[in-house]
Image (cartoon, rainbow, N blue to C red):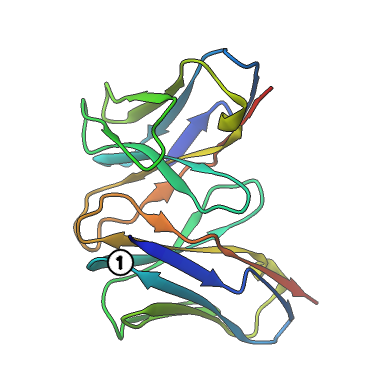
Amino acid sequence: EDQVTQSPEALRLQEGESSSLNCSYTVSGLRGLFWYRQDPGKGPEFLFTLYSAGEEKEKERLKATLTKKESFLHITAPKPEDSATYLCAVRSQAGTALIFGKGTTLSVSS
Amino acid sequence: NAGVTQTPKFRVLKTGQSMTLLCAQDMNHEYMYWYRQDPGMGLRLIHYSVGEGTTAKGEVPDGYNVSRLKKQNFLLGLESAAPSQTSVYFCASSYSLRDGTDTQYFGPGTRLTVL
């Protein structure tokens, strides 16, 4: 069964304190791994798609990496506006829809 | 370019009532999806459509029906609402399933409460 596990569930950082979020997955033939950001009361906002192990993508203070079993979302020198829930999802070879993890809620204080 | 829009934003129903949620996209996307999001659980797929006139069941389809009469619209119906259907509903769309064009873009959500 395809499964996505995100850790930690919640993470509190001081402004400027870099860290990483983890997304572990088991899927029958990975077609894509997706990272989204979700603010309270809003819909998920697309951040990155990774398709193969070793691939990396960056956007401002965020960098996503992918291995054969997990993905990391690295946050460098975070700011309070980076506070949000970060969702990871995978699509399998046979699948149409995304399988989502439960998310990591990040809080950055100044 | 509005992206994906959903109406209504909020709704309160009594048990047994029916309603329809509307999703519209202006990106000419072929694929559309309905998810629900509940506390402590990830987003779960209810139904999806791979093109105008087609629908298919997702992970949690019971109690819901869908229709895709026009490419840009995807309707989610609840025929007889139950308290277990209290949730936040998200619509999403994607251009295709090919690498590079399979990103799903989400709407702002509909918060539904069933009393």
In this view, the residue in front, A92 or A53, is: A92
Q: Locate residue A55, reporting x and y percent.
A: 31, 82
Residue A107 vs B104, above or below: the answer is below
The quadrant holding residue B109 is top right
Structural crowding at the residue carrying mark 1, measured as other residues with C-alpha within 10 Å and reported as few (<14), some (14–19) or many (≥20): some
Name which residue lies at 34% across and 61% down.
A2
**Residue located at (37% from left, 43% from top):** B59
- Residue A63 is situated, as x and y percent measured from the top left of the image, at 47, 80
Look at the picture and state if A14 lies above or below B105.
Answer: below
Q: Amino acid at mark 1?
A: Val
Q: Secondary structure at mark 1?
A: loop
Foreground residue, A1 or A52?
A: A1
Residue A50 seen from this side: yes
Quarter of the image with the N terminus of chain B in it: top left
Q: Is residue A53 left or right of residue A21?
A: left
Q: Residue furthest front?
A: A1
Q: Nearer the viewer, residue A104 or B62?
A: B62
Which image quadrant is residue A110 in?
A: bottom right
Q: How many marks?
A: 1
Q: Classify A73 as above or below B59.
A: below
Residue denoted by label 1: A27
Identified at 31% across, 31% down, the residue is: B72
Compared across the picture, whether B72 is left or right of B81 comes to left
Q: Residue at horizontal 65%, vertical 16%?
A: B14
Image location of residue A88, percent across then percent down: 46, 65
What x and y, as percent, mark residue A103? Answer: 56, 63
Please say whether residue B1 is visible from this viewpoint. no
